[in-house]
Image: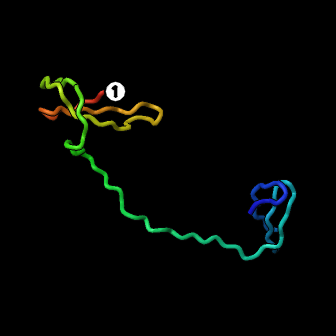
Amino acid sequence: MFCPKCGSILLPKKEGSKKALVCSCGYKNTELKDTRINETVKDKGQEVEVIDDPDISTLPKTDAKCDKCGHKTAYYWTMQTRAADEPETKFHKCEKCKHIWRDYN
């Protein structure tokens, strides 16, 4: 509930055997009804499936030279590996030898 005078949230306070809702501006509501908060949890739905090894056939390709075999085409994906204010890390996987390396640029 909110204060009708200033709009601030009313805080519960016990005065003797009675309970009241009071505001910092001085407003006081002593006419409390049996107020309860009911919470219902909706169905969570299906769970999110986490895939550790990405399906290569769905990844985009780019021109990137593999340091291991020298092949010039690689699959790539990005992942947030550092703090949120840092740029994401780009991973490459060689199309030929499947060597994986990181690109921080």
Residue 43 lies in quadrant:
bottom left
Residue name at image x 28 percent, y 30 percent: 102
| Type of amino acid at the residue the image marks with label 1 | Tyr
Q: Is residue 47 left or right of residue 75?
A: right
Query: Which part of the image, by quadrant, shows the C terminus?
Result: top left
Query: Which part of the image, by quadrant, shows the N terminus?
Result: bottom right
- Of 22 and 55, nearer the camera is 55
Tell me the element at label 1: loop
Residue name at image x 81 percent, y 58 percent: 23
Instruction: Report x, y in % for residue 78.
Output: 33, 36
Q: Is residue 41 left or right of residue 82?
A: right
Residue 96 lies in quadrant:
top left
Residue 63 lies in quadrant:
top left
Q: Residues within 10 Å of mark 1 (few under 14, many from 20)?
A: few
Q: In the current view of this chain or complex, which residue is farthest to the bottom? A: 34
In the image, residue 64 sits, relative to residue 15, either above or below, namely above
Residue name at image x 75 percent, y 64 percent: 12
Instruction: Report x, y in % for residue 48.
Output: 35, 56
Instruction: Report x, y in % for residue 90.
Output: 31, 32
In the image, residue 88 sits, relative to residue 47, either above or below, namely above
- Of 59 and 48, nearer the camera is 59
Residue picked out by circle 1 = 104
